[in-house]
Amino acid sequence: MLVLCLLTLAITLTIHARWLYVYDLNHSDVLDYVDLSPATILKNYDQLLDYFNYPWIKYLKMSDFPTSNSGAFHMFQVKILFQVNYVVFIMSAIYSFFYIWYLKKTSQLWTLVTPLNYLLILLGIALFFVAVGFNEVFILFHKVLFFGNDDWIFNPLKDPVILALPQEYFFHCFILFFSLFIIFILLFVFIGKVEFKRLSKKYNG
């Protein structure tokens, strides 16, 4: 459950990393394909993220980007995934708080070190595949999450918003997510090792 908490926290922080989109907007060729000002594109990006993030916004409406039926359905699926992530994060955070409190109280934080180290190895392998074959990973990611439907493949003529969301942006989102997730895990590995060192000194003199 702790890992789930750290996973969904990393996802949440990545979702809200508006600065990352601003960076890609200013350092990619988006403006070569979208005949809108950066401020207007950001306004539409904010409208899209508001739709994803707030359950009370029932319909997607971007001021300057029309949306096809298939595009709207895909965006709705993304919205559901966002909401599930937030619910899981809140529930796992509550559980993890008491779990960490119990481990600390009973001097068992060191037990986290070995399983988290194994997880770091798996994340390192996953990050390697993302770095060397992002396009294939990106396609597989969508096929798994969206049950094999092709609504995520946007036609720029019908869903021009895709021109404002370059693949480089999604690549950077993946890198940010993995970086945050690994940092969070390393933090708990460090805490566990500090406790183990303290206990070793206490019982071994």
Image (cartoon, rainbow, N blue to C red):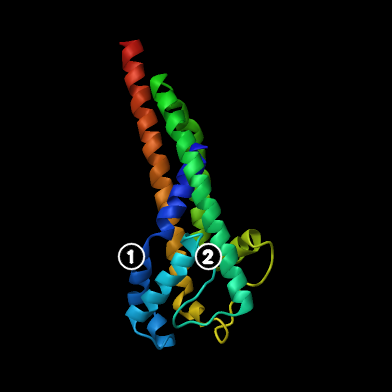
The residue pinned by badge 1 equals 19
- What percent of the width, then of the height, locates residue 142? 61, 64
For disc 2, the neighbor class at 10 Å (few under 14, some 14 to 19, many from 20) is some
Q: Residue at x 50, y 61 (%)?
A: 56
For disc 1, the neighbor class at 10 Å (few under 14, some 14 to 19, many from 20) is few
The amino acid type of the residue labelled 2 equals Phe
Q: Residue at x 51, y 41 (%)?
A: 91
The amino acid type of the residue labelled 1 equals Trp
3D distance between C-alphas at marks 1 and 2: 22 Å
Q: Nearer the viewer, residue 128 or 40?
A: 40
Q: Quadrant of residue 199?
A: top left
Q: Nearer the viewer, residue 37 or 3?
A: 37
Residue 105 drawn above or below residue 116: above
Name the mark on residue 134. Answer: 2
Q: Can residue 34 be seen at all in this image of the molecule?
A: yes
Q: Can residue 136 be seen at all in this image of the molecule?
A: no
Q: Nearer the viewer, residue 174 or 126?
A: 174
- Mark 1: secondary structure: helix
Q: Earlier in the sequence, mark 1 or mark 2?
A: 1
Q: Residue at x 37, y 75 (%)?
A: 42
- What percent of the width, then of the height, locates residue 44? 42, 76
Residue 103 drawn above or below residue 140: above
Q: Quadrant of residue 80?
A: bottom right
Assign the C terminus to one quadrant of the image.
Answer: top left
- What percent of the width, then of the height, locates residue 148? 69, 65
Q: Residue at x 44, y 54 (%)?
A: 12
- Mark 2: secondary structure: helix
Q: Nearer the viewer, residue 111 or 9?
A: 9
